[in-house]
Image (cartoon, rainbow, N blue to C red):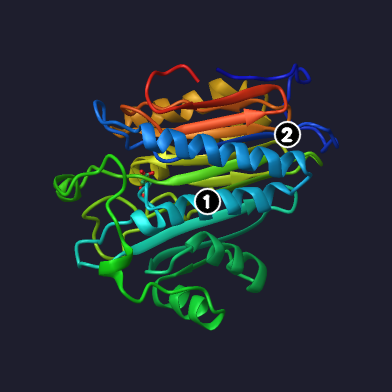
Amino acid sequence: MVVALPCEAMSNSTTKQPNKSYAFALHGGAGAIAGRNYAIVEEHLGDLTATCQAMLEDGKAALEVVEFAVMELENSGMYVAGRGSAPNSAGYVELDASIMHGPSREAGAVAALPGFENPICIARGVMEKTPHVLLAGTGAQAFAREHGYTEVLNPNEYYVLPVGVTEQDLNESSAHGTVGAVALDRSGELAAATSTGGTFGKLEGRVGDTPLIGPGTWADDNIAISCTGIGEHIIRAGGAVSIACAYKAGVALDAAVQDMLDEVKRLGGDAGVIAVSRDLGIAMPYNSDGMKRASVSSQQALFVRTFASQN
Ligand code: ASP
């Protein structure tokens, strides 16, 4: 379902208008497997979405809300991100995360970062404390240590198997998961954030779409987007920024998102997208088995689901 107010003809791009409305969506990854039980996940996503709704009603900034949501998802261990991440083929966890503030286009990201508890906060640190957008590998690790982010010192104790994932799945290189959040706040600002442990069994140093500003995460004055799915296909399909460009050119939100997903499918992958637009549109389609997802807005009641394609 797409909840959208009428927008101006021809183009979806206008200058930012302060409004009293808000919209929010989050996902726990498009790697949901048919037949598995995600009831606990749906309860968690519903509670977290209600908390984020209260933050937005209180006037909190979209950037704060998406960082908070992703941090909570990382900490839960229920998803393939943060605490729920699995080791790469060399036997250790490498994390990817990114965050973007729409109005300023400021963005920060970390890629192939060895174990820290909250890569999304480190991504925000890159945005605010360096002149760069993306730090990777040992450089990202050095930055995180220098700025005192919490490191995972006992990986065997810290990391857990996410809900719906079996030991067997860890040997399936096509299995994957991610978390993400997008928000429109009451001052009309948009922001997006995404975090992942990546695909299972990935090669050491492999980087997917998640930490890439453009494919995995995008926010501007019109739209905020977080992608999930097999990163290699999302990158080659253009990902989030291709949706933003189509939307800016006047394509309807749901059509812009679907076009990108169709291209991922054509390339042989599967994916899901969450997007909110400045006119309160919310889109959450996917072409995998299922996507753990939730949304709410000043005009739409809380929605939570994993399977069934209605949004
Ligand atoms: N996009 C993530 C990656 O390729 C995985 C996922 O979203 O499920 O690393």
Q: Residues within 10 Å of mark 1 (few under 14, many from 20)?
A: many
| Residue 241 visible from this viewpoint | no
Q: Is residue 236 above or below residue 307?
A: below
Residue at point 45%, 56% (across, down)? 75
| 22 or 161: nearer the viewer | 161
Q: Is residue 217 left or right of residue 223?
A: left
Label 2: element kind: loop
The residue under label 2 is which amino acid type?
Tyr
Residue annotated with mark 2: 22
The residue under label 1 is which amino acid type?
Val
Q: Residues within 10 Å of mark 2 (few under 14, many from 20)?
A: many
Mark toward the start of the polypeptide (1 vs 2): 2
CA distance separating discs 1 and 2: 18 Å
| Residue 191 visible from this viewpoint | yes
Q: Position of residue 35 (x, y in %)?
A: 24, 26
Q: Is residue 204 left or right of residue 63?
A: left
Residue annotated with mark 1: 70
Q: Is residue 286 above or below residue 121?
A: above
